[in-house]
Image (cartoon, rainbow, N blue to C red):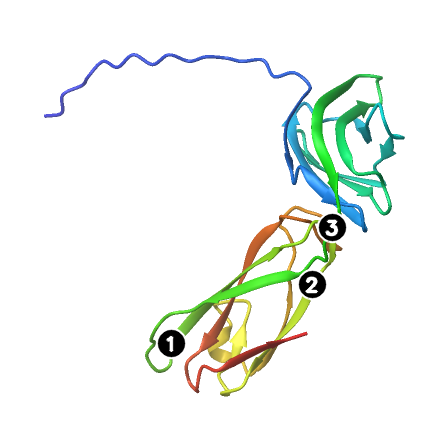
Amino acid sequence: QEEMLDQQIDLFAEIKYFEIANLQASEGGNTGTVTVKITGYRFDGIVEAALESAAYPSIQAMTLYPVDNTTLYARFDLLGKSLGIYDLKLSKANGESITSTDAFTIVPGEESQLLYSVDSPEATRLNRVVPYTIQYANDGNVDLPMPVRYLHSLGGAPVSLITELVAESTTLNLTLTFQEPNGPQDILRPGATSSVTFYAFSSDALQFQITK
């Protein structure tokens, strides 16, 4: 027989107003474009984002990529822009606006580079589906054009991006695009990290090479 227990649960409702909560990244280099992930609340209807400073001209976002009411990507052309600390201002079509003070810093630009590593099992048995996960990131402070790499199965083991298909696959080469989920699809922004998993069938030697 089950014993029923009384449990008191307190629920709290909080009204969220138009607000900027966080920027990723909070700094960018002045040698190219920089796409910033902005999170917060009540982002519906935003039509403009700008970096503002009392010392320098305002920098309007080139492009906005709204995801939902809490996430927005804004791309700024920072090429040659003055170094320093800027406020971030978001504006809606109805005239409402919000400013996050000292939210972003323009710093000297660094060459962006793709960093990646491959996680693989230490050992595997014959004729098994084997997952390999590639972790990747933009390690610079400006946008990196969407990285594309090519995976080659040197040992003859078939590969696929879909686990259910790899056992019957004859494919030995894959094209890998290193994108940020829900982010702009033409670049990998500074500080962005993600992963992609491919699968191999261990009917042959598991030897792989990744090239540009």
Residue at disc 3, secondary structure: loop
Q: Which mark is residue 128?
A: 1
Q: Nearer the viewer, residue 125 or 61?
A: 61
Q: Nearer the viewer, residue 138 or 130?
A: 138
Residue marked by disc 3: 142
Residue at 58% x, 52% y is 193
CA separation in Å, label 1 and label 2: 30 Å
The amino acid type, in three-letter code, at marker 3 is: Val
Q: Is 175 placed above or below 5 here?
A: below
Residue depth check, mark 1 versus mark 2: number of the one nearer the observer: 2
Earlier in the chain: of badge 1 and badge 2, it is 1
Dot 3, how many residues are within 10 Å of its Cα: few (below 14), some (14-19), or many (20+)? many
Residue marked by disc 2: 147
Residue at 65% x, 16% y is 17
Q: In the picture provided, is 62 more to the left or to the right than 25?
A: right
Earlier in the chain: of badge 1 and badge 3, it is 1
The amino acid type, in three-letter code, at marker 1 is: Arg
The amino acid type, in three-letter code, at marker 2 is: Pro
Quarter residue 3 falls in: top left
Residue depth check, mark 1 versus mark 3: number of the one nearer the observer: 3
